[in-house]
Image (tube, rainbow, N blue to C red):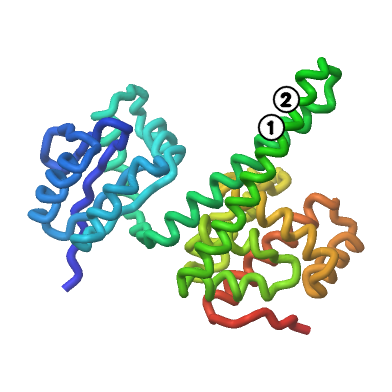
Amino acid sequence: MHLSPTFVGVDVSKAHLDIAIAGNKPWRLGNDKAGIAALTRRLVKLESPHLVCEATGRLTRALQHKLAEHAIPMSRINPRQVRDFARASGRLAKTDAIDAAIILSFAQRMQPLATPVPSPAQMRLADLVRRRRQLVDIVVMEKQRLKEPAEPLLQSSLARHLDYLKAEIGVFEQEIATAVAADAELEARARLLTSVPGIGALTASGLVAELPELGRIGNKQIAALTGVAPINHDSGLYRGEAHIAGGRQSVRCMLYMATLSAIRCNPPIKAFYKRLRAAGKPPKLAIVAAMRKLITLLNIMLERNQSWHPQP
């Protein structure tokens, strides 16, 4: 018999966990090993517990893995959804205890699905990919500063810093390749992705690390998760333009660069893009549509465990 989940709302901060369970007054534990263990002991006594919290990056990592050890599902939801839900409910006050209660109400009403628990190898790969991206962003900023008139000392400092950053990026790129090759599942997923014209090794590693849902959810869901699903703006007789919004920005940036490459060297994507342009679609709209088509193709490939094969 399927049991209805007993949702538990948790507001996660760096130092504390504020917990709300229906019929109980919210209480606080430390966001540390002892606090997480105490929360877990309380949850295992509940009937079909399901913890829900906001996605707060690394702050939920230890909690997620401790719950996985006891087969307790956990959902990490977008903080913006929680705030919108709070406003719609007329709850404008904000404290940690109130936030925990709002998360609980959101969970009871929306019934979110459990978030898959990443493996240690995938978490390490995601950390490496994230750090490389940070270094690349710093390089872009330093190159912009290098163009400005400056004292020779400043110019030489920028040049030395750029050389250092490029060397560091090389180190992380090697570490990323090693991390992918060392894990059978990550290597298999990356190999399927790199079989697609336009998807390089770094893009494949980034998608594997930061979009683990690829190949495991539906095409519409993966498009929305990536942020390339069109959102309509219609009201009455008014028909507004559909725009993309939300999604994971880092994944969308990777997909954008891969799509630009695919438009040049991937026959189906190239033909699709040209067909849209010939129909009078603006370049940006055609690129976004090509991004959506590419991520859908990647999703189908990983779902079927099939390498790239161009369709007629």
Where is the N terminus found, in terms of image quarters?
bottom left
236 over 66 or under it: above or below: above
* Residue found at x 65% / y 51%: 170
User: Is the residue marked by circle 1 packed among few (<14), some (14-19), or many (20+) residues within 10 Å?
Assistant: some
User: Is the residue marked by circle 2 packed among few (<14), some (14-19), or many (20+) residues within 10 Å?
Assistant: few
User: How many dots with numbers?
Assistant: 2
Residue 289: x and y in percent read 73, 59
Q: Amino acid at mark 2?
A: Ser
Residue that carries the numbered disc 1 in the rendered image: 161
* Residue found at x 89% / y 57%: 280
* Residue found at x 78% / y 84%: 312
Task: From the viewer's perspective, tell me whether residue 278 is left or right of residue 96.
Answer: right
Which quarter of the figure has residue 29? top left
Which quarter of the figure has residue 82? top left
Residue 178: x and y in percent read 54, 63
User: Could you tell me which secondary element the residue under label 1 belongs to?
Assistant: helix
User: Could you tell me which secondary element the residue under label 2 belongs to?
Assistant: helix
Q: Are marks 1 and 2 in contact (CB under 8 Å)?
A: yes
Residue situated in front as seen by the camera: 254 or 32? 32
Residue 56: x and y in percent read 40, 40
Q: Amino acid at mark 1?
A: His
- Disc assigned to residue 157: 2
Task: From the viewer's perspective, tell me whether residue 43 is left or right of residue 178.
Answer: left
Task: From the viewer's perspective, tell me whether residue 234 is left or right of residue 126.
Answer: right
Which quarter of the figure has residue 102? top left
Task: From the viewer's perspective, tell me whether residue 155 is left or right of residue 34.
Answer: right
Residue 7: x and y in percent read 22, 50
135 over 286 or under it: above or below: above
Marks 1 and 2, Cα distance to the nearest angstrom? 6 Å
